Amino acid sequence: MTATTTAPVATTPVPATRPPSARLRAWATRAPLLPALIFMIVVTQLPFVATLVISFFDWNALYPDARHFTGLDNYQEVLTDADLRHSVWTTVLLTVAVVLAGLVLGLVLALLLDRRFRGRGVVRTLLIAPFLVVPVAAALLWKHVLYNPEYGLFNGLLHYVGGPQPDWISTTPLLAVEASLVWQWTPFMMLILLAGLQSRDHEQIEAARVDGASDWQIFVHLTLPHLRRYLELGALLGSIYIVQNFDAVFTITSGGLGTANLPYTVYQSFYQAHENGLASAAGVLVVIGSIVIATFALRVVSSLFREEVSRA
């Protein structure tokens, strides 16, 4: 009796296909997002593409027939022109000063608000109020109510104690702009750092107190390392906004006395000199710098989310 064996027949796997109903459901869930996506592309991306194209042209609005393609000449002029380089340096100096001062003051206020005391909710609301003021209104408030040499609050207090009566904007123009921005953006830093303080492990802090650690040791060895990500986030987000600031410079000093930052220089090049190509090149550089900073900010936010998920 002979045994017969049959070799297994090789079968080709059939790729799984999604039924039409699943495809329809997927499109039905995405369809409500399409109008918002199209609107975002039309409002943000198309103008940026147009700006990028114009930045490669020598284009003066007063002489539209004389425009011609110049390649990277506008970008070279932005990076080599003395006035433009000074505006870039002013932007960096303004951003660093406002962000650092806002972080330090925001940390102090966050530490105070992290304590329990009567009326803490009211105090927190009052401290957040400067961040809710319209930027132009805040700049006008500082220019006329505080800085005015004749009827401003600062000179009124100095007159009361017999002090000098300086013209704050003329004598310290950049510091005047920085002070108004610090006043407006410190509550933003405070909110971020207060969220970080309230996410601390209180059991770890109590264990440190039991072991005899002082408040300063707890702050240096436990609180500050925990707040590192929140400090980075506040610095990055604050830098994105301050780099693009235009209202305070335009309202308080009108870009004079060495306070013209890069956004104000773009405004001057476009609306006053009518140099569309040069202004577009400077604007593209501002956008690129903001994107670089935003990339780091998104990484910090993602790491914060991962830390919160790991704790949960």
Image: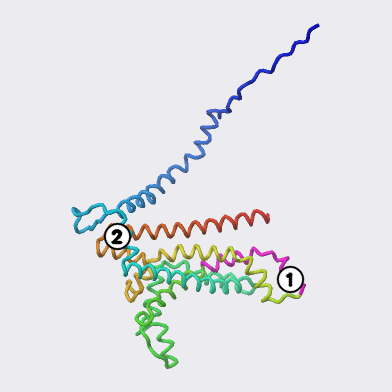
Question: Pointer 1: what residue?
Answer: 208
- Marks counted in the figure total 2
Could you say where residue 111 lies in the image, as x and y percent from the top left?
Answer: 61, 72
Q: Residue 121: in sight, yes or no? A: yes
Q: Position of residue 254 (x, y in %)?
A: 32, 72
| Above or below, 172 relative to 63 | below
Q: Earlier in the sequence, mark 2 or mark 1?
A: 1
Label 2: which secondary element: helix
Q: Give the residue number, with chain letter if any, for mark 2.
A: 278
The region drawn magenta spans: 188-211
Disc 2 marks a residue whose amino acid type is: Leu
Q: Please state the horizontal and vertical placement of residue 65, each as a whole percent of the image.
A: 18, 53
Q: Quadrant of the N terminus?
A: top right
| Tag of residue 252 | none
Q: CA distance from mark 2 to mark 1?
A: 59 Å
Residue 23 colored in magenta in the image: no
Question: Magenta stretch containing residue 191, yes or no?
Answer: yes
Label 2: few (<14), some (14–19) or many (≥20) C-alpha neighbours in 10 Å? many
Q: Identity of the amino acid at label 1?
A: Ala
Front residue of 90/175: it is 90
- Marks 2/1 in contact by CB < 8 Å: the verdict is no
